[in-house]
Image: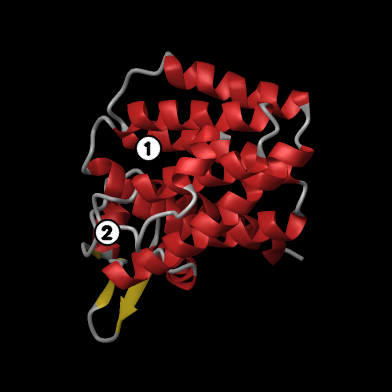
Amino acid sequence: MTQQPDKLVKETTTMAVYKRLFDYVMSGQFEPGIWIRERQLKEMLGVSSTPIREALRMLVQEQVLELVPHHGVRIKEYSTKEIQDYYELRAELEGLAAELAAERGSKLMFGKMEEILYLHRTFETERSDEAIVLNNQFHDLIVEASGNLSLKNTLQHLRVGINWIQVMAWSRNKDRHFSTFHQHQGILDALTARNPKLARYRMQEHVWDSIKLIIEPPGTLQMAGELRKS
């Protein structure tokens, strides 16, 4: 019985270290490929080795970090092929979410999206981590409005990889949050107009545009002209 409080403290410390390291990675403070050293983290965080090792293990399992045998752990680097795979899947899933949201979304959900856009419109910063938070909140609301739990769970599973790729892409374009705002407004306009096909197209266009500085999307979306007219 006397070990339970110690175990609770240990687990709490591990999660605190995990969340701090996760935030460091997602905010771009640790660049892709950089090695993460235990001694460095002990000095930064002021904790013992055990919670650091457990937090690192969790991040390796989530593919935020990668374990290189006999060398240690480092920030995961995504190949062009991996990024393309992620975004092909993301474009399809989020395009479907937008299509369903246009059909099923409530005025209340659309109002929440408008609130996010208001915050984004008055948001003047070059910090990609803060801009990505608003971006993700908007996308999460669309997925929620789709009413498809399986779709929501699948996108949550992809979130770590998507977030990290976003950090890399947005760090290369300091004005990315401005174009994101205008694209989000276009998506919301299609949602409130109850135009599923246009909502799907604009979402897919937005997803590919967000990553074009790293890779070029494979081909073009076929119904662009027709959808813009609808």
Q: Amino acid at mark 2?
A: Ile
Q: Secondary structure at mark 2?
A: loop
Q: Amino acid at mark 1?
A: Asp
* Separation of residues labelled 1 and 2 (CA atoms): 21 Å
Residue furthest to the top: 122
Reading the image, the residue beneath label 2 is: 215
Residue drawn at 33 percent across, 47 percent down: 167
Q: Nearer the viewer, residue 43 or 149?
A: 149
Quadrant of res 171: top left
- Residue 83 percent coordinates (x, y): 35, 64
Circle 2 packing at 10 Å, graded few (<14), some (14-19), many (20+), is some
Residue drawn at 59 percent across, 40 percent down: 199
Residue 129 image label: 1
Q: How is the image coloured?
A: secondary structure
Query: From this viewpoint, is residue 167 visible?
Result: yes
- Residue 153 percent coordinates (x, y): 67, 59
Residue furthest to the bottom: 70
In the picture provided, is 14 more to the left or to the right than 190? left
Query: From this viewpoint, is residue 55 visible?
Result: no
Circle 1 packing at 10 Å, graded few (<14), some (14-19), many (20+), is many
Does 5 appear above or below 180?
Answer: below
Quadrant, the N terminus: bottom right
Q: Secondary structure at mark 1?
A: helix
- Residue 64 percent coordinates (x, y): 40, 63
Quadrant of res 142: top right
Does 68 appear above or below 51?
Answer: below
Residue drawn at 24 percent across, 86 percent down: 70
